[in-house]
Amino acid sequence: FGRGLVTGTTALLQHSAVGVLNTSAKIAGFGGRLLDTLTFDDEHIAQAKRTAAALESKGLKDSLISGGKQFGQGIIKGVTGIVMQPIRGAKAGGAAGFVKGIGKGVVGFAAKPLSGTMQLMSSTLTGLRNTASAIDAQAVSALLRVRFPR
């Protein structure tokens, strides 16, 4: 009876923690993608999707590295976009494109660093979730061991 109670309680706590971490990671990831969409910068959106797919985190260390890269890219793109977006807009659409570029640059200046921050949070929470799942699998297998090693 005691062993079953310990196993059940451990599983409940672990699955609850993983569920909270997973939900939080999904919400933060959605927020980051929403901010990416609000920049109206198709190149940035496409690169953010490629980066997110390439940097899928496995553990906490990988997720911190991945999130740090996304955060840094968000800051750099936000700052450089103020200058580059009007230039791109002017090349594509003349004076009207230049004005559009100024709008995209200003919005991107705020949205891209925030998006990077949200992606950092999402990546870190995903790494914590994966780490919690891995630790629990090892702990439960040790609890259920019937015959101890010689």
Image (cartoon, rainbow, N blue to C red):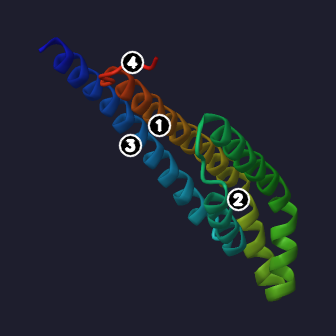
Structural crowding at the residue carrying mark 2, measured as other residues with C-alpha within 10 Å and reported as few (<14), some (14–19) or many (≥20): many
On residue 108, the disc is 2
**Marks 1 and 4 close (CB-CB < 8 Å):** no
Distance from disc 3 to disc 4, alpha carbons, whole Å, reads 37 Å
Q: Are marks 2 and 1 in contact (CB under 8 Å)?
A: no
Label 2 amino acid?
Gly
Residue type marked 4: Phe
Where disc 1 sits, the SS reads helix
Would you name the residue on which mark 4 appears? 148
Q: Quadrant of residue 87?
A: bottom right
Disc with the residue nearer the chain's start (2 vs 1): 2
Dot 1 corresponds to which residue?
Answer: 129
Point out the frontmost of discs 2 and 1.
1
Q: Dots 3 and 2: beta carbons under 8 Å?
A: no
Residues tagged 3 and 1 counted as in contact (Cβ below 8 A): no
Q: Earlier in the sequence, mark 1 or mark 4?
A: 1
Type of the residue with mark 3: Thr
Considering only order in the chain, which callout, 1 or 3, is on the residue closer to the N terminus?
Answer: 3
Mark closer to the chain start, 3 or 2: 3
Q: Position of residue 8 (x, y in %)?
A: 21, 24
Q: Position of residue 84 (x, y in %)?
A: 86, 67
On screen, 125 above or below 96? above
For residue 4, side relative to residue 88 (left or right)? left
Crowding at mark 1 (Cα within 10 Å: few <14, some 14-19, many 20+): many
Mark 3 to mark 1: distance in Å?
10 Å
Residue 117, image quadrant: top right
Question: Which kind of residue does numbered mark 1 sit on?
Answer: Arg
**Disc 1/disc 4 C-alpha distance (Å):** 29 Å
Determine which residue is flagged by label 3. Answer: 23
Sequence-wise, which precedes: disc 4 or disc 2?
Answer: 2
Q: Is residue 74 above or below residue 93?
A: above
